[in-house]
Amino acid sequence: MRKQIAAANWKMNLTYQQGEELLDAILKENIELKEHQQAVFAVPFPYLIMAQTRLGNKKNYAAAAQNCSDQPAGAYTGEVSAEMLRSINIRYCVLGHSERREYFSEHNQSLAAKTQRCLERGITPIFCCGEPLSIREVDAQESFVEAQLKESLFHFSPEDISKIVIAYEPIWAIGTGKTASAQQAQEMHACIRGLLKAKYGQVADSIPILYGGSVKAGNAVELFSCPDVDGGLVGGASLVAADFLTIMRALK
């Protein structure tokens, strides 16, 4: 079975102490994940070492960064490189979240470089793609996402593409309280897998594709039951221990 992932994206939330308390509340439940399951916590940069320490060697639990630089090193004040992340043993990095694309003008070419930096350092990119409401309203979501994938990822080899996790985000369903129906989610995940298969063949069957549009405790089971939905990239619900624990338990 493909890896099934519950990925928490804390975004720019929680104080250091609140982050400690949240992780402790989740860890004390001692959920033993199966071999193919993974819990990932994408925390703000100042909390990475704390999260890494608390997660320790707990099997199938990992800390993640929410971003990294597209440059390997140098005079880029305020940036954090993939090499820096690797030096503290960070194994995952979220790239191209819709908020980064919208608020910080990240584009597909820059995200291709960021993905390359992560792969060079043995960090698994969680690559985000997805359409805004204006694109969904004209039924152009498939071609929009296809362009994102082609411009950022499709120059990679089959070996490299197999090391990437995809997160599909219907942007109109992030932070709005709206959620794509399970059918809409499955249709887009199947489309993405089809694009990957057309380019890379059977390797597409091994690539996890997460759903990232207002995943909540109440809809996780239905969403994750879809054949091409391999877990979720979770925003607001990941800030509530009970909710994220429910989401973790919903993994296939």
Image (tube, rainbow, N blue to C red):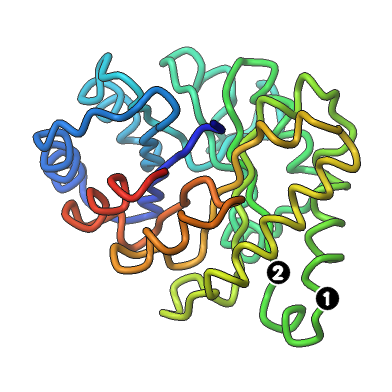
Figure disc tally: 2
Q: Which mark is residue 98?
A: none
**Mark 2, residue position:** 131
Structural distance between the alpha carbons of marks 1 and 2: 9 Å
On screen, residue 26 versus residue 184, left or right, reads left
Amino acid found under the numbered disc labelled 2: Glu
Where residue 100 sits: x, y (%)? 60, 56
Question: In this orientation, which residue lies closer to the viewer: 226 or 157?
Answer: 226
Q: Nearer the viewer, mark 1 or mark 2?
A: 1
On screen, residue 113 versus residue 157, left or right, reads left
Contact? badges 1 and 2 (CB < 8 Å): yes
On screen, residue 25 versus residue 214, left or right, reads left
Where residue 156 sits: x, y (%)? 84, 28
Where residue 211 sits: x, y (%)? 54, 56
Q: Which mark is residue 140?
A: 1
Q: Earlier in the sequence, mark 1 or mark 2?
A: 2
Q: Helix, strand or loop at disc 1?
A: loop
Is residue 237 placed above or below 29 in the rendered structure? Answer: below
The C terminus sits in image quarter: top left
Query: Dot 2 surroundings within 10 Å: few (below 14), some, or many (20 or more)?
Result: many
Where residue 144 sits: x, y (%)? 82, 65
Q: Helix, strand or loop at disc 2?
A: loop
- Report which quarter residue 185 is drawn in: bottom right
Seen at 46% across and 54% down, the residue is: 224
On screen, residue 39 versus residue 210, left or right, reads left
Amino acid found under the numbered disc labelled 1: Ala
Seen at 62% across and 62% down, the residue is: 186
The N terminus sits in image quarter: top right
Is residue 145 placed above or below 69 in the rendered structure? Answer: below
Query: Dot 1 surroundings within 10 Å: few (below 14), some, or many (20 or more)?
Result: few
